[in-house]
Amino acid sequence: MQELGRLEDLPLEYCDALSEQNLVPLWPSLRAVLPPGKPIPRTRATRWSYSAIKPLLLKAGELTPIEKAERRVLVLANPGHGLEKMQASAAIYLGMQLLLPGEWAPAHRHTPNAVRMIVEGEGAYTTVDGEKCPMRRGDLILTPTGLWHEHGHDGDQPVVWLDVLDLPLVYYMEASYHVDGPRQEVRADLGRAAFRQGGGVLPSPLFERSAKRYPMLRYAWSDTRAALESLAAAQPGLEAVQVSYVNPETGEDTQNILGYYALMLRPGQSLPLPARSPAMVFHLIEGAARVAADDAAFTLEEADTCCVPGFSKVVLRNTSADQPAFLFIADESPLHRKLGVYEVRN
Ligand code: GTQ
């Protein structure tokens, strides 16, 4: 490959004359912005251990009252991007949020999309667009772009959840903002109950399909886990026992930018994943697992989280010989597909 001219090769006066006119020569930076063969990711394979996060999060509960935090979150920041950027990957933000008994995180809505994966504790709820969604371990709750949401807690133990947002991308697009609102009125039944029943039927009053872009907001872990177990039992030869969280009306990804999945590893199973362009996040819901990505390898205990950059070869392994392992996965593939840059390499 041809060596290109460097900035230092140019006369200083010439560089100054360019800067004066807000101009920059491309050739000294061409290889950096268009590297050969594959991207050079800033995203570094990184693991965050829940046993390290939890005491620090509980300490935040003592140090900062909810009124002074609005959202009491420790951000899982990727050192490859610089911690102050608060991003796990190019498009993914991760945060661990604590809500103490009796606390209330007031209503707002914002342009980035969010989901919550509940990690620990009982009795908290998120009200999204008037629907009160109870939070239990492993549940996935959507708070899509523009929908009002607030968090409350009627239980007696701290509740912790993992927030996943597409904030880095929306922020980079200069499209990120929020609006505060009054406490939402909880509406008793919005017809969403019908979605949760499954059974292949959807509400269609007077022959119309729901006009809602986000007809289902809470995906109960008990249902998702049961789906994975029955899939594994029905297809003993199936390697990737995985489900996607989808809009039940359309079968499309739940959100526009990030994709969400749950995966079961059989006892002792190793599962190689193809190298794909989107970055990925793995969060261990249940069991014990190992995530190897190119040069990095992490052991995940329950509630641990890691991310790997796009184009990595990943191997997942269940380190238990007799128990299944259940992983929650987030990735950037809806975004990559829409942009036409999605790639799989084997
Ligand atoms: O719970 O609404 O981690 O607005 C970051 C921004 C959580 C939330 C985050 C948010 C929220």
Image (cartoon, grey):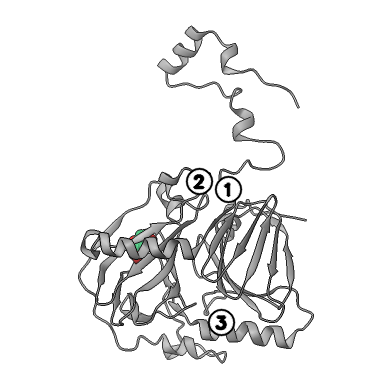
Label 2 close to label 3 by CB (< 8 Å): no
Q: Where is residue 86 in the image (x, y as percent from the top left)?
A: 42, 50
The residue lying toward the viewer, choosing from 55 and 267, is 55
In the image, residue 136 sits, relative to residue 280, either above or below, namely below
In the picture of the structure, the residue carrying the numbered disc 3 is 224
* Residue ID for mark 1: 44
Q: Give the SS element for disc 3.
A: helix
The numbered mark, 1 or 2, whose residue comes first in the sequence reads 1
Q: Could you tell me if the residues under marks 1 and 2 are in contact, i.e. CB atoms within 8 Å?
A: yes
The amino acid type, in three-letter code, at marker 1 is Arg
Residue drawn at 60 percent across, 12 percent down: 9
Point 70% across, 36% down: residue = 36
Say the numbered circle drawn on residue 275: none
Question: Which residue is painted at 44% across and 79% down in the image?
Answer: 218
Q: Which mark is residue 79?
A: 2
Dot 2: within a 10 Å radius of its alpha carbon, few (fewer than 14), some, or many (20 or more) residues? some
| Mark whose residue sits in front, 2 or 3 | 2
Where residue 88 appears, as percent x and y from the top left, is 50, 53
Between 198 and 271, the one lying in front of the other is: 271
